[in-house]
Each structure stands twice: as structure tokens, then as C-alpha cells.
Amino acid sequence: MESTYKLITLVGSSPKSFEDAIAHAVADASKSLRDLRIAEIEKQDCKIEDGKIVAFRVRFTLSFKYEL
């Protein structure tokens, strides 16, 4: 069966880890989008304050099935 997918870019953030940042972003996206397929990491970075990491950020492309 042929399918069409839409791509969006999201940024997740967490004080714990990169994995936690993307997990929370995907969980939030799943509340309003259906049929999520692939998350492709584009960029990871950290916010640093006073020599300590205070936030892990992940920018990623998320695909989901496009329904007409």
C-alpha cells in the first residue's frame, strides 16, 4: 500500500539527558499527531550555566503518516 508522510522539526529539552529530551518531545507530539513513524536527530546541544549543564536539547525531524 502506498503512503505519504509529513515531516516536522521539533526541539525537546530536559535537565536530565538527551534521551529524556527527545522522549518527552515525542510524547508531547503524540498527543496531537497520529501514526508517528521516524525521529531523525539533527542536532544536540547543552545549555551551560556556572560551568554546569542545566539543559540537554535535541532538534529532530519527526515523520508521521499524512491522511487526506
Image (tube, rainbow, N blue to C red):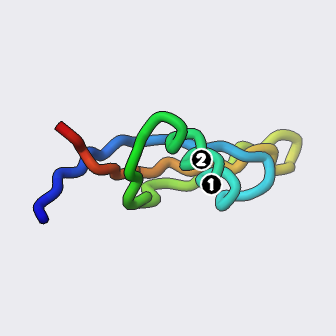
Q: Are marks 2 and 1 in contact (CB under 8 Å)?
A: yes
- At a point 40% along the width and 45% down the height, the residue shown is 34
Q: Position of residue 6 (x, y in %)?
A: 26, 45
| Side of 68 where 32 appears, left or right | right
Residue at figure coordinates x 51%, y 41% from the top left: 29
Q: Nearer the viewer, residue 58 or 68?
A: 68
Image side of residue 21 versus residue 5, left or right: right
Q: CA distance from mark 2 to mark 1?
A: 6 Å
Specify few, some or many for label 1: CA neighbours under 10 Å numbering under 14, 14-19, or 20 or more: some
Which of the two residues, 23 or 13, is positioned nearer the viewer here? 23
The residue lying toward the viewer, choosing from 45 and 15, is 15
Residue 1 sits in quarter = bottom left
- Judged from the image, the secondary structure of the residue bearing numbered disc 1 is helix
Q: What residue does disc 1 label? A: 23
The amino acid type found where label 1 is placed reads Ala
Q: Quadrant of residue 55?
A: top right
Q: Residue at x 65, y 47 (%)?
A: 24
Q: Secondary structure at mark 2?
A: helix
Q: Which residue is mark 2?
A: 27
Q: 14 above or below 68?
A: below
Furthest residue toward bottom: 1
What amino acid is found at the position of numbered circle 2 in the picture?
Ala
Given residues 63 and 18, the one toward you in this image is 63
